[in-house]
Image: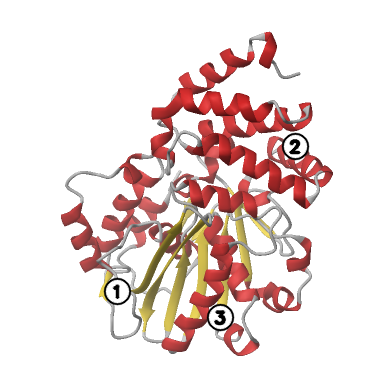
Amino acid sequence: MLNLFDYLEWRGDLSFARDSFNEVDNLIMSVLAYVKFEEIVPLETGVGTIPLLKAAERLRETMEEPSSFYSIPFFNQIPKLLFKAAESKRFRDIKLSGYVNQIDYEQSKQFSAVVFSINSKLHFIAFRGTDDSLAGWKEDFQMSFMEEVQAQNQAVIYLERILSNLAGDFYLGGHSKGGNLAVYAASHEPKNIQDRIIGIYNNEGPGFQTNIIQSEGYQSILGKISTLIPKSSVVGMLLEHGEEYRVVSSSETGIVQHNPFSWEVKGRNFVYEKGLTKDSLNINKVLRAWLNQLSMEERAQFVDALFDIIQATGAKTIGELSKEKLALANSMIKTYKNMDTLTQSHLKNSVEIFFKESQKVIKNSINEDINSLFSKKRFRLK
């Protein structure tokens, strides 16, 4: 079962001049977009660049004590991927520039992107997926009812700025929300910018509301979109996709397959499956049926309630949640009282999934505490 690290081990000696850009390269750069490149990669493009090797060396110097961001499973493998890529002939001389990282807790905005210049005429713009900030997670949920979230707006502005500063052709991509941003940004640009985009990779990112799918801008880039999802996809099947998707084999099970380090690689391609698992199809059927029953206003109320519960702890990142179990539970109780039974049930499940799947460092104790509270007749959900 080969993965991204194996790809770098066995094919890292092949330069892009010898072996052209491929779908696995896309995922590596999309994952590297999660790296915190503050004060390492310049904001400016073109002249202001830094080779990947130098960026990795500077990051290593600052990582004497790993931050909480890198202690979370999936995230803690990202620096290792950076260092491995920096050792390879294929990636070490790629120039990085245009790094931005914007987080606004009041507006629920989390946006980050970076440019990988393979050479002076070919670039990959990588949009970061959801990091460990609760602002980013709430923004993901807002996609289910908002015409445009803050990160999508910023992605359009960013893409236009980068293409106006750099010559050549571009690939766009990202993992999770980053994949959604790549597609959204390209679909909202004028034709002269779209013509410079060779391909767009959506690696297990959620889809869009129907009006986006039907828009002229989206339809004009449809043939350039490559959507890759694991066989037990949940995130990548949310909302609507107008394009065809391909199903990647994973060494993990269930929603953990969202972790791109579990995606199986063979040569310069992924290993593909014939289709999604029954569990994935069933989960998505249930989610879609429930969402279809809610108006946009009801979806907004649900998301606000969910994050009122989580943010009541005072935490701003996922890594801080385990410290505030009691405050979390108390907030949950107060919020549940004002909701109908069906919405209460979905909210309870959402909170449990959020804790269980989004942060593996939080053990079963939180879920046990929550369940024990609702075992009391007064707060039991039917």
Q: Which residue is mark 1?
A: 42
Q: Could you give the CA–CA distance between mark 2 and mark 3, rounded to whole angstroms?
A: 35 Å
The secondary element bearing badge 1 is classed as loop
Lateral position of residue 307 relative to residue 50, left or right:
right
Q: Going 74% across and 33% down the picture, which residue do you hit?
A: 343
> Between residues 3 and 69, which one lies in front from this camera angle?
69
> Between residues 370 and 116, which one lies in front from this camera angle?
370
The label nearer to you, 3 versus 1, is: 1
Q: Quadrant of the C terminus?
A: top right
Q: Which residue is mark 2?
A: 282
| Tag 2: amino acid | Asn
Q: Which comes sooner in the sequence, label 2 or label 3?
A: 3
Q: Could you give the CA–CA distance between mark 2 and mark 1, rounded to whole angstroms?
A: 45 Å
Lateral position of residue 210 relative to residue 153, left or right:
right
The reply to whether the C-beta atoms of the residues labelled 3 and 1 are less than 8 Å apart is no
Q: Quadrant of the N terminus?
A: top left
Expressed as whole percent of the image width and height from the top left, the position of residue 160 reads 52, 82
The secondary element bearing badge 2 is classed as helix
Q: Is residue 75 visible?
A: yes
Q: Going 26% across and 63% down the picture, which residue do you hit?
A: 86
Lateral position of residue 288 relative to residue 168, left or right:
right
Q: Going 73% across and 46% down the picture, which residue do you hit?
A: 299
Q: Which residue is mark 3?
A: 197
Is 156 above or below relative to 233? below
User: How packed is label 1: few (under 14 Cα within 10 Å), some, or many (20 or more)?
Assistant: some
Describe the colour scheme in one phrase: secondary structure
